[in-house]
Amino acid sequence: MSGRKRTLEAISFELVMTVIAVIALVIIIAPSLVVLIVSFTSGFSLRFPPPGYSLRWYAELWNAWQLHFAAKNSLIVALWATGLSVALGVAAALAISRSRTLSARLLDSLFMSPLVLPALAFGLAALMLFSLVGLPVSPLTLVIGHTVVCVPYVVRNTVAALAQLEPTLLESSAVLGASRLYTFRRIVLPLIRPGIIAGAFIAFMSSFDNVPVSLFLRDAATDMLPIRMWQDLEGKLDVTIAALSGVLIIATVALVAVMERVTGLSRRLTN
Amino acid sequence: MGAAPASRDVTSYGMGLAAPLALFFLLFFVAPLLQLLWLSLHNDTAGLHWGLGQYLHFLTDPFSLGVLGSTLLLGAEVTAVCLVLGFPIAWLYQRVGPKLQTIIILIVLLPLLTSVVVRTFAWIVILGRQGIINATLQSLGVIDTPLKLLYTQFGVVIALAQVQMPLMTLPLITALGRIDPNFDDASCSLGAGSWRTFFRIVLPLSLPGVIAGCTLTYAAAITAFITQSLIGGGQMLFMPMYLYQQASTLQNWPFASAISIIFLLAVLAVVSVFTTLGRMSRGYGGA
């Protein structure tokens, strides 16, 4: 009797947990699928399901020069911000990763703080500082602002990769007479490269998608894609934006697939 | 202090390598925030008269306090929804084979890397007057006129929960993966049921992950400018939009600075409460 009660009890638990989990997974994935489907509509509205299917809005996208311009700006800023983040972030990660000193821990908290602090407040602060020193908004100010909010991803992933590095490898290399630079190039760098690439990838994506910092640090000449999309959506519900969303979703899926192969991205983010 | 021994120790690198980033942060992160603080302590736009006028204005204005309150409440609601929906995902992840595990991780991960504007836009399509929910309910004959889902608190919470779900789920998966499965078996063989085992063993042991997830979700939800403004529309005002309106439209930089500082402090307070809870929970988990 008690045995049967326990199995019923166990089944009820497993059932509830599984059902909620499946509902949650559907909620996570559904919006992207819906946008993908709607982007192929032949109609003029975002009706779901669409009245018919066509590629007209993707063709429309071809001529949307404002979006092209914004996409180009976003891409350039994201590439520069990622490059700068990697250069500064990897060096800093090397310095703080194996150190237990107070200064290392303080620096670690400092470098991570842009992740939790409201980015909009930082955007405003950066704008005020740049205008105080007389630096007009430009791609340069955007790159600087984006680097501040993107560098934590590089630092975090590089520190994680360094933490898994066997110290004996470095000692052996030194005992065998290798210089520090040689050891770094031939031992350390190859082993932490996947971590650096994963961090750089996340930094790139978050710069490309950044709104709060760009909002303050751009002007008409440096329009950024997410802001252009946001302002288009505030005004009217444009199906062209659905097509652009389709392109972005497919590009993201492709990039994540590549990154999963190259760096084992999913393992990295759950360890 | 560490310079001399560090150069001899081949397994670590000198702190000097952190100098470029530290300098960069000093110039472009710390200095701007200090300037923000400095301007917020002035009563006039030019920054000539020191005073707490901006803060007094905010703290005595029911409208401003209302905006702060509804923002903090929004964060709590979104965090709760994410926890309730995200925990079963992490639980399921530990139960399935490696192939399904990869699929679950990718489902959770993809939205995190998809543009926030795209994800928010998707919710407009779903919640809108002609959206899926209304279309389905109307064709089923449940309702005659479309429900108002967009521009409501419900809409903002559900959209934000979906947007921030990965931030909750990933730490939970990590935390659940670290629990020794023997605890589960021991609890069950000692006669505790599945529910009891879950609430008495699994949940307490995963508290560090719960707290990490809650911190990230909360901080992200209250600053999610795009989702708040597109799904919430003009009627609902939260701190990020309030800050943006004051700074950009009204050009009232000192007041916008004060809003920023109050908002920063609110986030820091919440984060430190979570961190303290996290430290306590680690002691609890080990006991």
Image: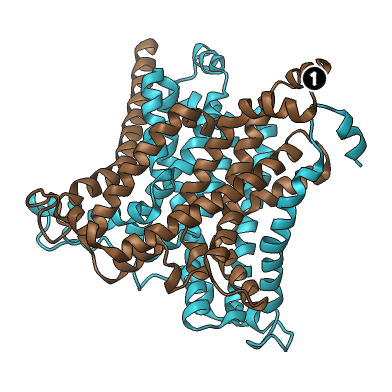
Chain colours: A brown, B cyan
Q: In this picture, is A193 found above or below B186?
A: below
- The three-letter amino acid code for the residue at tag 1 is Glu
Locate the N terminus of chain B and report the quarter of the image it occupies.
top right
Quadrant position of residue B39: bottom right
Q: In this picture, is A230 found above or below A108?
A: below
Q: Nearer the viewer, residue A24 or B119?
A: B119
How crowded pointer 1 is (Cα within 10 Å; few <14, some 14-19, many 20+) is rated as some
Which chain is home to disc 1?
A
Quadrant position of residue A229: bottom left
Residue at 54% in and 53% down: A80
Query: Viewed as shown, does residue A260 lie left or right of A161?
Result: left
- Whole-percent x and y of residue B130? 16, 59
Locate the C terminus of chain B and report the quarter of the image it occupies.
top right
Residue at 80% in and 26% down: A179
Callout 1: helix, strand or loop? Answer: helix
Query: Viewed as shown, does residue B101 lie left or right of A152?
Result: left
- Whole-percent x and y of residue B115? 39, 51
Q: Nearer the viewer, residue A59 or B259?
A: A59
Query: Viewed as shown, does residue B27 lie left or right of B193?
Result: right
Q: Nearer the viewer, residue A173 or A192?
A: A173
Query: Viewed as shown, does residue A245 lie left or right of B194?
Result: left
Residue at 65% in and 29% down: A189
- The residue carrying mark 1 is A171
Q: In this picture, is A260 found above or below A80?
A: above
Residue A231 shows in this picture: yes
Residue A118 shows in this picture: no
